[in-house]
Amino acid sequence: MNAYGEDSNAPHGRHGPGDGPDPAPSPGPARGGIAALSAPCRVVAALVLAVVAVAACVHLGMVFLHVAPSNTVSKQHAQAIDDWIYPEFEQNWKLFAPNPLQQNIAVQVRAEVGTADGGTRTTGWYDLSAEDGRAIEGNPVPSHTQQNELRRAWDLYGATHDGDNRPVGLRGALAEQYLRRLVVLRLDRSRAAGAGGVVERVQVRCRITDVPPPEWSGEKARGAPVYRLLPWWTVPADEARGGVR
Amino acid sequence: MNRLAPSVSRGIGRVTEAALGPHQSAVIRIGFSVTWLLFLLREFPHRQELYGPDGPWSRPLAQQLISDNGAFTALMWFGGRFWFETVYALAVLVSLLLALGWRTRTMSVLFMVGVLSLQNRSVFVGDGGDNVLHLMSIYLVFTRCGQVWSLDARRAARVRAARARGERMPDRAGPVLWGVLGLFLAAVTAAGRLEGEWFVPALLWTVWLGQALWWAVGRWARSAQPRLLLDVVADVVHNGALLVIMAEACLIYATAGWYKIQGSRWQDGTAVHYPLHLDYFSPWPALAGLLSASGTLVMIVTYGTVLVQVAFPFALFNRRVKNVLLAAMMAEHAVIAVVLGLPFFSLAMIATDAVFLPTSFLRRLGRWASRARARLSRRGGRAPVVDPRAPEDTEPAHVGFPA
């Protein structure tokens, strides 16, 4: 196996004896690429060269149209571009662009807990993003669980729901379950249910605070944080302990 | 037309006679595999939450999304904790072996399988760094990235030396690895687990069959021609992939830069202030405060970032300008690693940048590394490991990038 890997050694040996496990006698140090080949082999090599060149150009063209703003060509060939790009070549390089995010978005959750004595109580708000922030502070290698998981779960929810919190498409339904499972996991870690209690319902909200403009800019900071409150979600019984612990 | 023809034929000669940029392809191989290895080790305590069957993005959720988008992930082939742990452990092992350059082509395929399996299983936990690794792990499969700085290169040198003495060094590990992986691939295919898009499964089978062909031709071909042909094919594919990798890097910078130009904050020179004050990207608030204390400094960094990103693709036409911008970009990514708390994103970007490093610099790096290794092994009481022909000294003068 590994024929390719095997031969990937210093170029001097490539046509010589370094190649296969037991190759034929060395053809000598002849190098010269396509020029060293016999006519039929040369045809095959030329064909391969053409295919590779075309494939590379088409691929780069498709990637370009995928990352470029929507334009005449990409609108005309939207289907072909998507077919080529998705799922494995999807990409997004609008890194902090066109404008960097200028708001701190904190995801918070509270729970309705069924207590051991048969009653219910509602917990206070847990600021999960603040927990993430504390885990990131002073941490040279923040984990994806601290930096991306909740942040992107919320982004996904926002991107797949309308203003009335109605899910849009398959991803909307998935995003809701994902966010619910995630906050239940986090509540479980904080032991929000208390001894003998069970989390029965959860409610998520987010607090959006503008990052204050730099002092030297002379811009005025905007006022109080804005909240977005989601409806209460019922937690299925088998999910209440949060899966991974 | 008269001048065009010879230069076209010279170009065809170049891309068919050698896998260009052996040092550049080796350094990105090491860069990407080490980045992914460190990431996997860092997330080891969190692996269940991120990618495990009972994580918040549970197996049923992943199943629904994957049956919709057709992405490749070996994690969905079987359920349960055991398979997950196996895949994760193998992903770690394969990253290490790819960095070392052991059976490079096979490891690059398995590396891609590991990266895609974990990332496609949980697409919503990644960031730009994951995106870079995702693409590059696919592109690496097409390259001959183990020509230098690899165990493969060392083994090939030994085989050559043995042959010069008239001895034979039979290869046992290769056929065994090929057989085991082929059996597994066949079993998974027969069981109908290789669903989704055709691209990755087709790639797996193509490489597997290609290796069989390579081995068979090396062993049984009567004339040298078939082997020379396969070699040319491998070189052409490598060169195409290297072009794609470099162009992809340019697209990343161009996109990042040109979109920024449209943003009001990048225009008014305050953009850099904002990420420094996002709770999710400020592990060192005091440092961030220090960096954004001066409006002039923030403005210079803001404009400088856009300038470098937009200019980079064009700078490739001038070697000296390119090297200056490359150094600036690597430095900026190193700063981002610390200040914004994005070490793996930054490492992946630095590894991408490394494809543009000049050959002379990489050779110096190689010599420096082998001297350091020799010194280390002397101190460890062992005899210094000196290859009779260190890989970096076996390069013919014309191999490598002009820049």
Image: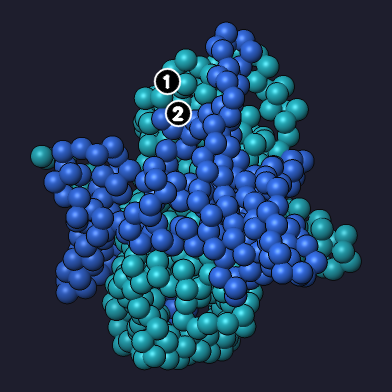
Chain colours: A blue, B cyan
Q: Residues within 10 Å of mark 2 (few under 14, many from 20)?
A: many
Q: Amino acid at mark 2?
A: Asn
For the point 57% across and 8% down, which residue is it?
Answer: A218
Q: Amino acid at mark 1?
A: Ser
Image quadrant where one finds the C terminus of chain B = top left
Q: Which residue is mark 1?
A: B264
Q: Is residue B122 left or right of residue B258?
A: right
For the point 33% across and 43% down, which residue is it?
Answer: A67
Say above or below: B61 vs A191. Answer: below
Is disc 2 in the same subunit as disc 1? no
Q: Which element carries disc 1, helix, strand or loop? A: helix
Query: Where in the figure is residue B362, as x and y percent of width and height?
Result: 57, 47
Query: Where in the figure is residue B11, as x and y percent of width and height?
Result: 27, 49
Q: Looking at this view, is A181 or B73 the one in front?
A: A181
Q: Which numbered marker is on residue A237?
A: none
Toward which corner of the image does residue B203 lie, by quadrant? Answer: bottom left
Q: In the displayed image of the protein, which residue is found farthest to the left?
A: B1
- In the rendered image, is residue B377 in sight? yes
Q: Is residue A218 left or right of residue A90?
A: right
For the point 66% across and 64% down, which residue is it?
Answer: A199
Q: Chain letter for mark 1, please.
A: B
Q: Which numbered marker is on residue A99?
A: 2
Q: Looking at this view, is B48 or A34 the one in front?
A: B48
Q: Looking at this view, is B161 or A73 the one in front?
A: A73
Say above or below: B195 vs B367. Answer: below
| Mark 2 vs 1: CB contact within 8 A | yes
Spatial CA span between label 2 and label 1: 7 Å
Say above or below: A206 vs B300. Answer: below
For the point 76% across and 53% down, which residue is it?
Answer: B372
- In the rendered image, is residue B389 in sight? no
Q: Which element carries disc 2, helix, strand or loop? A: loop
Query: Where in the figure is residue A229, as x and y percent of width and height?
Result: 52, 43
